[in-house]
Image (cartoon, rainbow, N blue to C red):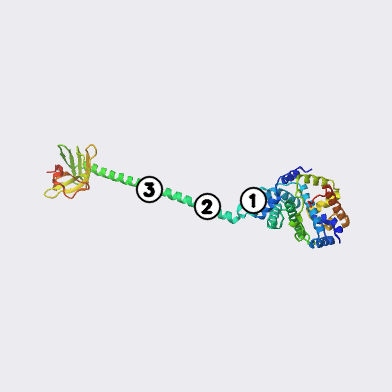
Amino acid sequence: MNLLGLLLALELSEGGNDSELARRLQRREPQAMADLYDRYGRLAYSLIYAVVRDTGVAEDLVQETFLRIWNRVNGFDPDRGALGPWLLAVARNRAIDYIRSARARMDRNLLDLDFFERAEHGRPSNFVDMEREVLHADSARRIQAAMAKLNQNQHKVIELAYYEGLSQTEMAERLGQPLGTVKTWVRTALKHLKDELGGAVMTA
Amino acid sequence: MTCDELMDDYGTYALGALDGAALDELREHLGRQCENCTAGIREAEGLVARMALVVKPADAPKRLRKRVMALADPHAGGSRWTRALVFVTVLCVFLAVHSVFFWMRHEAMHREFNVFWAKYTQQQSEVARLNETLALLEDPAAKEVTFGKGARGRVVISPKHGVAFSGQNLAALAPGKTYEMWIIPKGGKPVPAGTFEPSVDGSALHVQAGPVDVASMAAVAVSIEKEGGVASPTADQIIIVAPVGQ
């Protein structure tokens, strides 16, 4: 188990009330931004750095992430939304966008550069009615345990998708495998993770 | 495609890996607010959000917090122009304070210099007067006349340097009064030769500098007059008369 990851999760679990923090952001309280950063800044930076592998770029993207949250928080429902997962989705989208753009500069044949920008990912509405404790310490332990149980192929496709932003087609090309095989690996990996986590990621 | 057919792709979609026809189909469902697909996607987003917890932690630089805070409060960290303005303002205040400080110091030094210069000038005058007195007393051509009874002393008359009066036992003066020396020419009116005040022991040295015609002088007298001196001696106030004679 990644103990540092666990500590991160513990920090998050002690972070207090996300709903109230979201309301303060909506009231444009500057201190709320500081509190948001104190609660999720390190995790966002770690996630972005894991994708881009450049400290300077990671700093810029973290700043962009928090700016996006600040600018779009009024579309967020503090009573139903999950602030942390939304922020992390935005952070990952910024990072994946960056590496896809960088990759496109080297490969002009790569299309759909702004997939994440055009897609629905990162919308605040995607994070309503989500379990509020998604980022708790127990979640960290369970997701780490679940990831450890994935086989090599499943682990590889999850990493390629999560850290490099590759689509199924791109992964098939990268791995030299049929598209159907890659789709199966991705689906079974995600199903395995969902099952390991108990499938309870909704409050309903 | 039906929702049941798409549900296996919710996770792939949330992961950002879905492409092709399945992606178009799912977007179409989400675009028409399909409840099943919307709920399934939210669930999958929660799963993907958890994946951040397996990321190897990295320490963000401390300056990043300031950068993020500046997004919400641009004045907190201060923009480049704000910092420049603050710097210029501080510099101006610094220069102003130093200017006032150096101006006050200059004024104080100027006052000290004036006091020093006044003392220097006064001392120079004293030295000049003493030199004149010394030259007068040492003039071989000078004539000395003594006087006595009560106030006593002597008068030295130098044709070249003037008249020196040295007296002792001079009475203390009443307020508003002064001693005034007179040079009395033969057959002429007394000429004022300066005022003076004795020291506390009753002695006084008074010099009227400038060449004098000893041959035309009949006497040197001293009277008590009102402060500032008068043009003609008050007859009943003449206390000393030193006849020069021949």
Circle 2 chain? B
Residue depth check, mark 2 versus mark 1: number of the one nearer the observer: 1
Q: Nearer the viewer, residue A114 or A132?
A: A132
Q: Position of residue B39 (x, y in %)?
A: 80, 56
Q: Which residue is mark 3?
A: B111
Dot 1: few (<14), some (14–19), or many (≥20) neighbours within 10 Å?
Answer: some
Instruction: Report the amino acid beneath label 1.
Output: Gln
User: Label 2, label 1: how many angstroms apart (C-alpha)?
Assistant: 31 Å
Disc 2 with disc 3 on a shared chain: yes
- State whether residue B234 appears in this view: yes
Indicate the amino acid at tag 2.
Leu
Residue at which label 2 appears: B91
Q: In percent of the image, x 26 and y 44: which residue is there? A: B129
CA distance for labels 2 and 3: 30 Å
Using the rendered view, name the quadrant where residue B130 is placed: top left
Residue at mark 1: chain: A
Tell me which amino acid carries mark 3.
Answer: Arg
Answer with left or right where residue A95 lies relative to residue B162: right
Tell me where residue A144 appears, x and y as whole percent.
Answer: 80, 46
Q: Estimate how packed mark 2 is, as few (under 14), some (14 to 19) or many (20 or more) residues with alpha carbons within 10 Å.
A: few
Q: Secondary structure at mark 1?
A: helix
Secondary element under disc 3, as helix, strand or loop, is helix
| Dot 3 alpha-carbon crowd within 10 angstroms: few under 14, some 14 to 19, many 20 or more | few
Near-viewer residue (B39 or B27)? B39
The quarter of the picture where the N terminus of chain A appears is top right
Q: Is residue A82 left or right of residue B217?
A: right
The quadrant in which residue A119 appears is: bottom right
